[in-house]
Image (cartoon, rainbow, N blue to C red):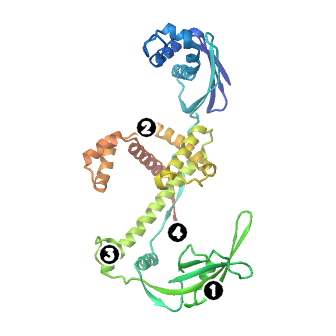
Amino acid sequence: MTRKDFLGRMEITITDKTSVEKEILIIADKSELAPHIEEAYKRYQPKIEIKGFRKGKAPLHLIKSMHGESIEYSELDTIASDIYRQVIKDRDIHPIGEPALIDVDYKPGENLSFKVKYEIKPVFELQQYTGIPIEKIKHTVSQKEIDEEITRIRKANHTTVEAQKATDSEHILMTDIQPVDESGTPIIGKKTTDTKIYLASESLYPEIRDALIGCSVGETKKVKIEREHEDHKHTENLEITVKKIDQIVPAELTDELVKKVTKDKVATVQDFTSQIKKDIENYWIENSDRKFADNLINELVKKHTFDVPESLVKSILDSFVEELKYQYPNKTLPQSFDEKKYREENREYALFQAKWFLIREQIIEKEKLKVEDADLDLQAEKEAGKVGIDKARLIEFYKTSNSVQERILTDKLMATLKNSAVVTEKIID
């Protein structure tokens, strides 16, 4: 669809490329350009030196005659941008992302013609978002879970005793590892010495664990590891010599251990056991709430079909990359990191997030949700003790923080959606 009209002495043609991508052709009459070009001369005047005049003091008519053409060409992008902003303001157009200036056509003293590609938010009908049927998981913490967590803590605070044989996986082995070829000949330069192997480690190859359980000090075990990759199979042959074996002895669960691991926040085994139960219960509650919210959002996104602006998807991918940088030293991605591949792999998720962002906006508007002073007060009440900042100062900060207000707004939105959902509990072990 193409629409043509006029604004003053400018001819404007807007073409719909998609429901969210537009292209605007602007042809500006030379008389319409005159004030913009005059402003360009004034911007350049302080920078120009002409013999016989101090820098920046040369008269405009002389600047025009000597440098007019080059100034006009160099300022075309700025002039086109100014005219474009004037047009979209007059037409009440609200682009998102960065517009792209293309096909600029101009000769001094003549009309200026140029195109701008831009995107807008999609217009779509908000589907039913209340009364959505959603499953919510419910879990009763068992004594087995509590015992397993206590065992994990005891192991984390273990001591060791030297042993002659690794009778089970709760042993740490000091080893030398020699890669060998298919014939059993050692591969020169590949041997690693004094390598510790914890047999219960989840990251340990099962073949290595199976070979070393039951071994004694001084034994050498041959291990063959086969792995399939996308386009090939990989085989590695190892000879592992056991030099020393330490058996892990889990710490005794005593009041002293409890005080150590909790930094004196809990004093007795009984209270510690109760605290572990409460922590596991909270984990399941938080896990249930998170999955419930995710499923609710998934259902809402599935209900809506509309075009998503590419600039919005790109912006979300940009935020993913920026967050990733914080995981590396100096907030810089390593040279080996394939950012293009990362963006391709995460594009679908970014598209999903972009759709949810647009749906979320509409629901917030329809529900007339906004951040009230009472919301800021409640948030500060919760956070003041944790962050060690006076409540009143925290409230003043919240009033200027878009991220905090967005978080509060999202919480209010999710509370609205959850309260209206038709919930079915699903009991899980």
Can you tell which mark lies on residue 260? 3
Query: Does 160 sit left or right of 321 as displayed?
Result: left
Closest to the camera, between mark 3 and mark 2, is: 3
Q: What residue type is labelled 1?
A: Lys
Where's the N terminus, which quadrant?
top right
Residue 50, can we see it? yes
Q: Earlier in the sequence, mark 3 or mark 2?
A: 3
> What x and y, as percent, mark residue 365?
47, 37
Sequence order check, earlier mark of 4 and 1: 1
| Residue where numbered disc 4 is placed | 428
Q: Position of residue 259 (x, y in %)?
A: 30, 75
Whichever of callouts 4 and 2 sits on the residue coming sooner in the sequence is 2
- Number of the front mark, 4 or 3: 3
Q: Which label is found at residue 368?
A: 2
State which mark lies toward you, 4 or 1: 1
Res. 237 image quadrant:
bottom right
Q: Image quarter for residue 103?
A: top right
Q: In this view, does 282 lie to the left or right of 269?
A: right
Task: Look at label 2 and name its amino acid.
Answer: Lys
Give above or below for 225 relative to 2: below
Residue on which disc 1 sits: 221
Q: Find the residue positioned furthest to the front.
A: 52
Q: Measured from the top left, where is residue 52 in percent x and y? A: 46, 10
Separation (CA) of disc 3 from disc 1: 40 Å
Who comes first in sequence, dot 2 or dot 1?
A: 1
Q: Earlier in the sequence, mark 3 or mark 1?
A: 1
Q: What element carries label 1?
A: strand
Verify CB contact (< 8 Å) between mark 3 and mark 1: no
> Is 305 in front, or is 24?
24
Q: Residues within 10 Å of mark 2 (few under 14, many from 20)?
A: few
